[in-house]
Image (tube, helix red, strand yellow):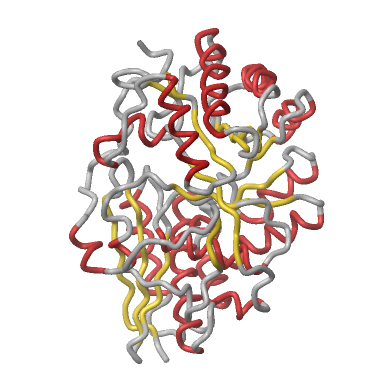
């Protein structure tokens, strides 16, 4: 069994692109991986092409040997585009190996610990704020829209949601997903603090007492500003406040000053990056992006987190392929808190992988088919190509710039 070709796809996902890797073999098996990134899509697939000569002609079942060869070649450019490209290839190799053996990938790592995985509805409200027409949903033009959306979350069986900071209006304004960042000083104006309270209160009124709320601040705030937001969030039933920060001690400062759980890590790569944060006790829950780390390295991080008595949560706002990959991770490690998923998305999301997902009470079943248990429909991928040179869909002015 030999690898004959590596092909990549950059798919239009509305306000961001998705990237996929197909590893083809001489016996007709194709393994699929996802390495989606909203900012450098063609840089990532170009790097996959750069790595291809080191992969084509080899046995795809030698996943770890191929991974470490690619890692050594890219060692002088750790993380970022190189890591995502390697992850896309590695994920496709695991899929091919599972298909060749006729087993799900989780069986290669000891079989499933759980049969179903609890999910939270991510970018709840923030997806609709900028893209309601494409999604086919009501706009976020008032705080009452958050309350109505909260009721929808509960009615559809979810027990948790995550939102970004959004000020309702026509158009809505905000920080984070779909909006870009805030002012360069990363301060938090009084306007934002007032909005945090009103937005979380509106969601809380809609979901009722049985649903947890998470708030994602991304990289937008310095510790002082993030601490102010966390103090406001303390009055609500919070799943967590999510904060990205490249300084473990600064994140620990925020964590020590609030009763709200702190989650971080979506931007980190491998145990070398995460270990500093674990040693500093910087976070309560650990976010892991599997399409950026690859499967085996994500599992390494999850098990290292277990040794520090920390729970993990897969970062997953991508396609259904990524969702299946993340479910396999959840199936093979004990310390999963919850898993992310985007519900509001482009109309062709289901078509891209042959159909929709079967949600039951805000959970998904662990896949049981060979490999990831799902395939990329390449015809659909080619029908929705992300235009080369098109930047991320972050065009509206964020809060604090008008």
Who is closer to the viewer here, 381 or 4? 381
Residue positioned 61% across, 39% down in the render: 211
Who is closer to the viewer here, 202 or 242? 202
Residue 20's x, y, as percent? 36, 62
In the image, is 310 to the left or to the right of 360? right
Residue positioned 44% across, 64% down in the render: 88
Who is closer to the viewer here, 211 or 270? 211
Residue 372's x, y, as percent? 47, 73
Q: Give the number of callouts.
A: 0
Residue positioned 42% across, 47% down in the render: 343
Say which quarter of the image contains residue 279. Answer: top right
In the image, is 387 to the left or to the right of 22? left
In the image, is 372 to the left or to the right of 107? left
Residue 348's x, y, as percent? 26, 55
Q: Is residue 109 above or below residue 262?
A: below
Q: State the residue lying farthest toward the top.
A: 190
Who is closer to the viewer here, 111 or 31? 111
Q: State the residue lying farthest toward the left.
A: 383
* Quarter of the figure that contains the N terminus: bottom left
In the image, is 146 to the left or to the right of 304? left
Residue positioned 42% across, 52% down in the render: 318
Residue 119's x, y, as percent? 56, 52
* Quarter of the figure that contains the C terminus: top left
Say which quarter of the image contains residue 328. Answer: bottom right
Q: Is residue 146 above or below residue 1?
A: above
């Amino acid at each position: 069994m030999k690898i004959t070709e590596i092909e990549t796809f950059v798919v239009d996902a509305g306000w961001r692109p998705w990237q996929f890797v197909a590893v083809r073999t001489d016996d007709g098996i194709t393994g699929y991986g996802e390495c989606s990134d909203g900012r450098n899509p063609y840089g990532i697939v170009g790097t996959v092409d750069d790595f291809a000569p080191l992969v084509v002609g080899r046995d795809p079942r030698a996943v770890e040997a191929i991974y470490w060869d690619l890692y050594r070649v890219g060692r002088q450019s750790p993380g970022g585009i190189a890591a995502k490209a390697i992850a896309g290839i590695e994920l496709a190799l695991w899929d091919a190996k599972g298909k060749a053996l006729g087993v799900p990938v989780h069986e290669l790592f000891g079989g499933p610990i759980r049969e179903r995985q609890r999910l939270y509805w991510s970018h709840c409200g923030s997806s609709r704020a900028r893209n309601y027409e494409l999604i086919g949903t009501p706009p976020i033009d008032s705080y009452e829209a958050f309350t109505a959306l909260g009721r929808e979350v509960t009615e559809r069986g979810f027990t948790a949601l995550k939102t970004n900071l959004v000020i309702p209006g026509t158009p809505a304004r905000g920080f984070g997903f779909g909006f870009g960042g805030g002012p360069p000083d990363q301060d938090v104006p009084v306007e934002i603090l007032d909005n945090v309270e009103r937005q979380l209160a509106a969601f809380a009124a809609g979901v009722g007492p049985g649903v947890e709320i998470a708030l994602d601040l991304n990289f937008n705030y310095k510790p002082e500003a993030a601490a102010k937001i966390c103090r406001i969030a303390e009055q609500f039933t919070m799943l967590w406040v999510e904060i990205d920060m490249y300084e473990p001690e600064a994140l620990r400062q925020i964590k020590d000053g609030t009763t709200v759980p702190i989650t971080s890590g979506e931007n980190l790569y491998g145990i070398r990056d995460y270990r500093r944060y674990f040693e500093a006790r910087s976070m309560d829950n650990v976010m892991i992006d599997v399409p950026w780390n690859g499967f085996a390295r994500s599992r390494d991080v999850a098990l290292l987190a277990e040794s520090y008595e920390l729970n993990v949560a897969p970062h997953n706002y991508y396609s259904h392929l990524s969702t299946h990959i993340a479910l396999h991770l959840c199936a093979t490690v004990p310390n999963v808190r919850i898993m992310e998923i985007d519900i509001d998305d482009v109309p062709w999301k289901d078509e891209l992988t042959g159909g929709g997902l079967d949600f039951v009470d805000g959970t998904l079943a662990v896949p049981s088919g060979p490999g990831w248990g799902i395939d990329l429909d390449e015809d659909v991928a080619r029908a929705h190509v992300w235009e080369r040179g098109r930047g991320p869909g972050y065009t509206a002015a964020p809060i604090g710039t008008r």
